[in-house]
Every structure is written in structure tokens, then in C-alpha cells.
Amino acid sequence: MKTALEIRRPFRALLGKHLPVGKVLLGVVLLTSGGVSLAWAQQPPKKTTPVEAPDPLIQALLETQPREPSELVRAVKLLLSRQRPELAQQFVQKLLQAKLDDQGWTQLVLEHGLEVFSQVAQEPKLAPAGQQLYRRVLQALQRHLKDPQRLRQAASQLEAVSPQQRYEAFRTLALGGEQAAAAVLEHVAQNRPKNLAPFVALLSYLGSKAHGPLRASLAQPEHFTWPLVVEVAARQRWREAVPYLLGVARGRAFSATQRQLAHTALVRILGREPDYQRLGAHWRAWVRKIYYSPPEALWPEPTFTQWQWAGEHLQGQSYPRVMFPALRARELMLALHRGGLSTPDLARINYACMTEQLKWQRGVSRPLEPNMRFVSNPRHALEVLQEVLDHPRGVAQVGLLEYLYHHGNAQLLYTSQGESPVVLALAHPQAIVRHAALRTIFRWQPKETFPGCHRVVQALVHMLRAHDTRVVLLGMRGTQAASRIRGVLRPLGYEVVMCRTTQEVFRQATARPDCELVLVDPYLPGVPIGELVQRLQADFRTHGLVVATLLRYDPLAPGGQTPPVRGLPQFLPTEEVEDAREQLEQLLVRRSPLQPTREQRLRFAQEGLRWAARWLEQPPSWLELRSHQEVFVAALEVPALRTEAVEVLSRLGTPESQQALLLPINRGLYSLQERQKCLEGFRASVKRFGLLLTPGQILAQYDRYNRSATEDAQTQALLSAVLDVIEQAGSEVRHASSPGTQDAEP
């Protein structure tokens, strides 16, 4: 047996000659095949892990066992800096259990900084306690910095004799934002100090954070704080203060001192003498731009605060973002009106703003009462509606239509300019506006043909296609993949409709008001996806519909995935229901807040069926509903619409409508009460229009009765009653067609 030293020598010789790797490996094989034991070579060398020297700082920290909040934060900070987050977990838990008020948390932030809490939140090994601690600190800090009582006390100390007190007050208010500005203005209004310099300095330092409360004072030139705010606006060269100052500088109702002060401030802000006509034209255009812009383009947050003076108290009220254009535009219009810079079109926008504000405060779904109005007469309301109809101000349009519902009449449908704004509203992209227009026209009950009367039937029929469901259109061709997507969407309450082409997607979307989302494969046959989206947005029935593309595997695309379509979100197919729910929630956030909910769509359909039934009692010459009878037949299949659908079908007077009323009775699928309603509707239809069934349908009805021998007595009674109606109608026909009997001669 060779020794280990002898075994090593051939390797050393081979390596010394720099032989190719293949020959070296061949030598290894030969050595091993010769029976040489290489067990020692197969054993990997033992890895010696270096023993870390204990950190004296960490040892000392763990021995002291910190308990006070400040000590705990210092301990967490030290352990994170030493890369030992697992040891910091216990101290984070103790901080969460600490009973600190807002001032205590704020003191910790002032002492140690906010960065250490941010590091705790970002450390994965401290989750979820780290995120909880960070949120608690931020919330406490926010509440403490904006505490009204604390800010009012600091505002009163801006006039203190002690420089240290003035410094502490300024420091406190500088971190208070809008609430600090409101506290300062309230203090000035209530105490009326002679020296306004510290208050001007503080408000100027706050900058844009103080603009909300400052607007409240600018909008009321008679208020005591107005000169102070004008000085602050001039120092900041605040451009948005210009329309408020224009109204005072040009207003005849103000004193010479006020007009001069406003003029001087305008010169300081603009850097030159103001040209009032050009400035008026500019701000009028700006008002129109604000009112007709989407709310999210003007204000990023979901809510905003509107400040307003109530005596000597400055009150802030929170509003949803959708109200921002109306409130801000109306405030600027009132300022321009003071200076005589308003115009008739701006006055119409002002009435629209007031109507919209009233609707939001009352509730969009609650109609206005007859006494709730701002316009002087129906013609004026029609002019205002015409002004805003082509812009996305749906709530104002609904409010104006509700005013016309109470105070207008059918004469407003006949105009020399073509179609009335009320008729044009029937093709509005928002369903709530179309519903309000239909409701108004139904109230007016026009008898004669008017321009655009075909839009009534078009809007009504589309509204009646709502069937109390939530629909997702799935545009793709893969059957297995589509089945998986359908399987995760159905438990969420969605009806999934398959579409094989983009043309089919468009047809289904325009025919289904219950459609809330379109998921489409980017490679779906038909027109390009971008063109499909444009067509959907251009059609009033599908405007605002959310469209998303399906993210799937594509070996030919970069990254192996389907490329995104510009401007469209993506949906990642999943087999997890909760994952699909989260994705759908993120997609449906893109819907307009004015899009009707499932309950609203159902209510609109119920009202539409009632209107149709009333119209069919004495149908005007311009109304043609019989050509759309399939819509009323389909409504009969919806449980929540059956009562109203029976009323319409009983007044329609077609063979199809009478046969549709008999189907529920023959099938026996509906409740007894619903089948009795259908029988009453069939009886009313036959009484009014006569028996319209074909001989084959009549014979089929007799066969159905004969097959009911084994069914319950209630079903037999209903089927027998149907035959009674048929036989009575037949006897009346035979009696009417037989020659009259002549009197016998004496």
C-alpha cells in the first residue's frame, strides 16, 4: 500500500508540467482504478467558523435591561446600527406596550429623530411590529402638531415679551400647517392686536400650507383680517390671490382705502401696473378651466378642506374631491363679480356650481325638492344646462334636470336650434344624467313628435337591459385559461361573458349596462385594442368602462410576457380568489364615482318599466316600443323586474307578448303569486287586444293542460284559467262574426 506522500507525487509532477486538464483527470482515474484508497480526498475539509467576539456594547445593553421609552428607542437604534435586529424585537414590543400620549411620542421624535422609526418599519425581521410602531408614531405626531388648543395657545404667545416664548411659539406654529394658520387668524380676529408684524411673518413663513385659511379671509373683504392677509399675499407674490384682489380693486362697494390696498398688492404681485381687462379675461378663462377639469387633475388627495369664517371663528369643513371644481370655481366667480368682471356665460356656470353644491350636500341619489332652486325660470335652467352639457359635470346636470322636472313642460322640447338640451342629455355618457332626462320627459308627457324623440326609446331600452348582475367581459380564445379565470371570478359574484373577437366585445359591452369590467387579450382577433378602447369611450353606453389587458406568457415578446397597452392596466390571471379580488378592487377604483351601482341600475330598470307601462296606456305617436319587445320579455326572467315586466307585456299587444306571459305559467318555475300575476296580465292583454295566439299555440296550451293531471291543484287551476280566457275570447269572436238574428214576422 502506497503512502499518502507517494500518492501526492504524481499529481505534483503532472501539475508541474502544466498538462491539459483532460490528462490530469485521466491520471486521477488511473490512480483510483488501481485500487488506491482516496477516502481522505473524498472528505471535504472541515470548515471552521470564526467565533465572533461578543460586542461589549450589546452585552452592556442587555445587562442593563432598559425600561423607559427613551432608553428603549436608544437600545433599538444601537442594535440596528450593529446589524442585530433580532435582538431589537423585544424592545420594539415594549415600545408598543408603552402607554404614551401624543406629547410623549412627539417628545421621542424630537429627541431621537423620525429616521430611527422609519428604519424599524423597513426592517423585515421586525415586521409587523415595526410598521405598527411607525404608524402609531406618525399618527401621534400629526395629532400633537395640529392640536387646536395647543396652536391657539402658541398664537397668543407670538406677542409675548420674552424672546424665548416668542421663539417657541413660532417653532410650534411653523409645524402646524393649515391649522396653525387658522389659529393665528382666529387670534387676530378675536384680539385685534395693534402689532401685526409677528403674525404676518408667521403666515408668510408657512407659505402654501396657509393658503386655505388665507382664502377665507380674501373672500370676505369686510373682515378684520383682510388687510393682514393682503400683506401676506403680496409678500409671497401669491398669484392665486389676484382674482380676489381684482374684485376689490374694481369694486364700487368698497372704500378708497381698500381699493388702494388691493391695487398696491396687485402691483407687488404682478411686478407692474395691472391691466384689469386682460386680467379679467384671463381669470374668467381660468374659472372655466377649473370647473370643467377632472377633480383628480386639480387636487391629488381624496378629500380637501374648505375654510370659512363664522363670525370670529374660522371653521374648516372636509369635502370629497369631486366637489373641488364647483367650490373653487364659484369662489373665484364671486370675487370677479364684485369687480364687475363677470359675463353671462360665467353667471350660468355660477348657477351650475350652486346646483351641484346643493346636490352633493343633499345626496346625489336624492332628487331636489320643488323649492330648491337657484335659477329664475325654466328657460334660464335650459340655458345653464346647455352651457354645461358638453362637460363632465354630471351632478350639476342632474340637479338642473330635476328642477326642470318640477317647473318645466313639454314646450321646452321644441326649440328653433334643433334638439333640446333635455333631449341631448339622453345620450350623456353618465347613466344618472340619462335617467334624470328620461324622468323629466316622462313627467312632461309630450304628445307630438319633437326633435330627437328617437333618443327616448334608445335610452330607455338600454336602461331596461340591466338584469341585477355584475358582468365581466372576458375577451380571449384559450378555453382552458378562460375557464380558470371564470372559476375565480364567479365566487366574487361576477357573471363572466366570453368574447372571441374585439367586435364581439364591443357588441356585448354596448348591450349590457351591467358590464363593469372588460378583460381582454392583447392578441384578440379583430380591431386593435387601442381602437376598441376608443370606440368604447366614444359610445355613451360604454363611456368610462374600465378595460384591462390580460398578462400572459408570450415566448416571442421581450421578457416572455405580453407587452402592456399604453394607458391600460393589466390583470394577472390567477387561481387564488383573494388575489383576484384585490386585483379587481384596484381596477374598479378607476371607475367614475358617478357610475351607478348594481342597486341603482336595478332601480333605474324598475322605473323605466313603470314609465313604459304608463306610456303604453295611451302611447303617443312618436313612441314605438313593440319593435323592442325582446327587452321586456328578457326582463320577465329577472325576479326583481317581473312585476313591472308583466305590466308592460300586458299593454304591448303582440303575439310574442301574450306567449311570453304564458311561459311562466306553463313552466311552473316561478312562485304561485308570480304566475298569478302573469295570468292577470294575459287576461288584461286578451281583453284589450283580443286573442293573438296562433292556432298551433292554442293547441299547445290544451296539450299542456292535459299533461298536468299529475301536478298540484294550484298549477291545474292556473292552466284551466288560461283555457277559460282563450275559450271566452274565441266565443266572443264567433259571436261577433255570426249574422244577427232578425225579428220574426207576425
Image: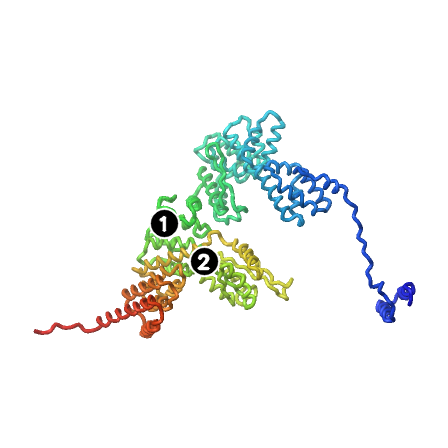
Determine the residue positioned at 32% across, 71% down: 693
Q: Is residue 568 visible?
A: no
Residue 720 relative to residue 481: left or right = left
Q: Is residue 313 visible?
A: yes
Q: Position of residue 57 (x, y in %)?
A: 75, 41
Point out the image quarter for the N terminus: bottom right
**496 shown above or below 387:** below
Q: Position of residue 472 (x, y in %)?
A: 50, 61
Mark 1 vs 2, N-terminal side: 1
Residue 156 relative to residue 11: left or right = left
User: What residue is shown with label 1?
Assistant: 404
- Farthest residue, direction top: 161
Q: Quadrant of residue 554?
A: bottom right
Viewer-proximal residue among 734 and 268: 734
Q: Position of residue 226 (x, y in %)?
A: 50, 33
What is the three-letter code of the residue carrying label 1? Leu
User: What residue is shown with label 2?
Assistant: 540
Label 1 crowd bin: few (<14), some (14–19), many (20+), radius 10 Å: many
Per the model, the C-alpha gap separating discs 1 and 2 is 23 Å
**174 shown above or below 329:** above
**66 shown above or below 588:** above
Q: Quadrant of residue 16?
A: bottom right
Label 2 crowd bin: few (<14), some (14–19), many (20+), radius 10 Å: some
Viewer-proximal residue among 148 and 615: 148
Which element carries disc 2, helix, strand or loop?
A: loop
